[in-house]
Amino acid sequence: MIHPADGKWFPADWKQGLMSAGSLDVTDAWIFKLRGSPHPLPSNARFYFTEKGWREIGRRVIAACQKTGQRYRIIAIKETDAQICWRDKHDDYEVAVQPKRKRRG
């Protein structure tokens, strides 16, 4: 992607997730629906949709990505494979997780 201000190329820009400067269709699919954590989270925490969030928001986001040609990846994990550090208790749409800590034996 080329930055409009200085015309310089920055190739990793597409990897910035839903918050990146994508199309309005993609943003409209999730904006005002996801809350995010009200407090700081660890730097290795990642956000995922819950099953309810995937059904009600995630599928619309993917449809908007397909419509506009924006790249996307679907990553499915089991809760047992991660340590939950925040959960959306209001709408149950999203969860923030960290990789499980490996036990040293």
Image (tube, rainbow, N blue to C red):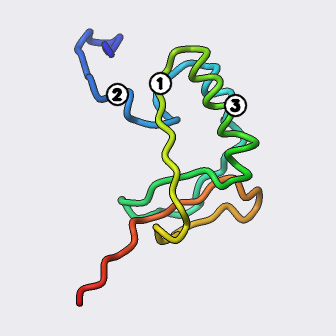
Is residue 67 depicted above or below 94 in this figure?
A: above
Q: Give the distance between the C-alpha atoms of the residues marked 2 and 1, in whole angstroms.
A: 9 Å
Q: Which residue is mark 3?
A: 60
Q: Amino acid at mark 1?
A: Ala
Residue 53: image x %, image y %?
A: 70, 48
Q: Is residue 30 left or right of residue 68?
A: right
- Local crowd at mark 1 within 10 Å, few (<14), some, or many (≥20)? few
> Tag 3's secondary structure?
helix
Residue 105, position as x, y percentages in the image: 23, 90
Q: Residue 4: x percent and y percent?
A: 35, 11
Quarter holding residue 54: top right
**Disc 2: CA contacts within 10 A as few (<14), some (14-19) or many (>=20):** some
Earlier in the chain: of badge 2 and badge 1, it is 2
Q: Nearer the viewer, residue 14 or 36?
A: 14
Residue at which label 1 appears: 21
Q: Position of residue 39 (x, y in %)?
A: 54, 64
Q: CA distance from mark 1 to mark 3?
A: 18 Å
Q: Residue at x 59, y 59 (%)?
A: 95
Q: Are marks 2 and 3 in contact (CB under 8 Å)?
A: no
- From the image, tell me which residue sits under label 2: 13
Q: Of the residues tagged 2 and 3, which is closer to the observer?
A: 3
- Residue at (46, 68) in percent of width and height: 82
Q: Give the image quarter of residue 29.
A: top right
Local SS, label 2? helix
Dot 3: within a 10 Å radius of its alpha carbon, few (fewer than 14), some, or many (20 or more) residues?
some
The residue mark sitting in front, 1 or 3, is 3
